[in-house]
Image (cartoon, rainbow, N blue to C red):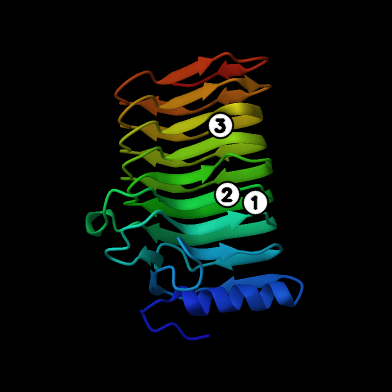
Amino acid sequence: YTADGTNDEVEIQAAIDAAYAAGGGTVYLLDGTFTINDSVNANRGIVMASSTRLIGQGSSTVLKLVSGANKNFNIVDVNSAVDVVIAHLSIDGNKAAQGAQLYMGIRILDSYRITIDHVSVANVVTNGIEADNGTSQYITISNSWIRDNNGIGIVIDDVLDVRVDNNFVVSKGNYGIYGGGDWLENPIITGNYVLNNGDIGIYTRDAVEGNISDNQVRGNASHGIRVNNADDTVVSNNY
């Protein structure tokens, strides 16, 4: 599959679909900037399938939203999928060239055993990474840079057994890390650097059996850490 810099979601999606059809597999992206539009999936750039992995070469692999998308848009979408890995790549929301619609770098909905690792999400009009509004379980977001987005850095909303660890969440327009919804069970938020965000650094509400520990939370515009209506939630060793 050869991407040419225009509607590169076509080739990437074709490779993911082929891996899925073969029973699962890994799609490797080389160095370069891949321009992402929604020519394959309406309002979504790349849609992950069960038992697939999308792996780049690090920060030199960039998925960049096309200029002037001007619609609600998830650059990478994980919906009703199981066993998905997204790792070692960057997502650029290209916010300076977008309108005021709802954009997200990565959105996870109704999915299980999803891993986001060593991913940079920057310049998104709204939220960087969002797992929300469903029955998602066993979500891991680790070792990632979430920066310079206009909304919330990381959202974990109505999810179970989620781990957010060792991320840098900096210079957001809103909360750094937010967890809530009708249920938030066993969230582990640990070892993150949550710095200079536009509102609360780490904010959870209605969490059950949560653990917020060993985070560096500094320079945020409001509270460093705020916990509302928690049940059996431990907050320790943050500074």
Residue 103 % position (x, y): 39, 51
Q: Which residue is located at x 38 percent, y 48 percent?
A: 102
Q: Which residue is located at x 39 percent, y 31 percent?
A: 175
On screen, 110 above or below 81? above
**Which numbered dot is residue 114?**
1
Q: Amino acid at mark 3?
A: Thr
Left or right of residue 212: residue 239: left
Disc 1 packing (10 Å; few <14; some 14–19; many ≥20): many
Q: Are marks 2 and 1 in contact (CB under 8 Å)?
A: yes
Residue 76 % position (x, y): 50, 59
Kindly report which numbered mark, 2 or 1, lies closer to the viewer in this rendering.
2
Please state which of residues 142 and 82 is positioned toward the viewer in this rendering.
82
**Nearest to N terminus: mark 2 or mark 1:** 2
Kindly report which numbered mark, 2 or 3, lies closer to the viewer in this rendering.
2
Q: Which residue is located at x 64 percent, y 37 percent?
A: 162
CA gap between label 2 and label 1 equals: 8 Å
Q: Secondary structure at mark 2?
A: strand
Left or right of residue 177: residue 52: right
Q: Amino acid at mark 1?
A: Ile
Residue to which mark 3 is pinned: 190
Disc 3 packing (10 Å; few <14; some 14–19; many ≥20): many
**Which numbered dot is residue 108?**
2
Disc 2 packing (10 Å; few <14; some 14–19; many ≥20): many
Q: Are marks 2 and 3 in contact (CB under 8 Å)?
A: no
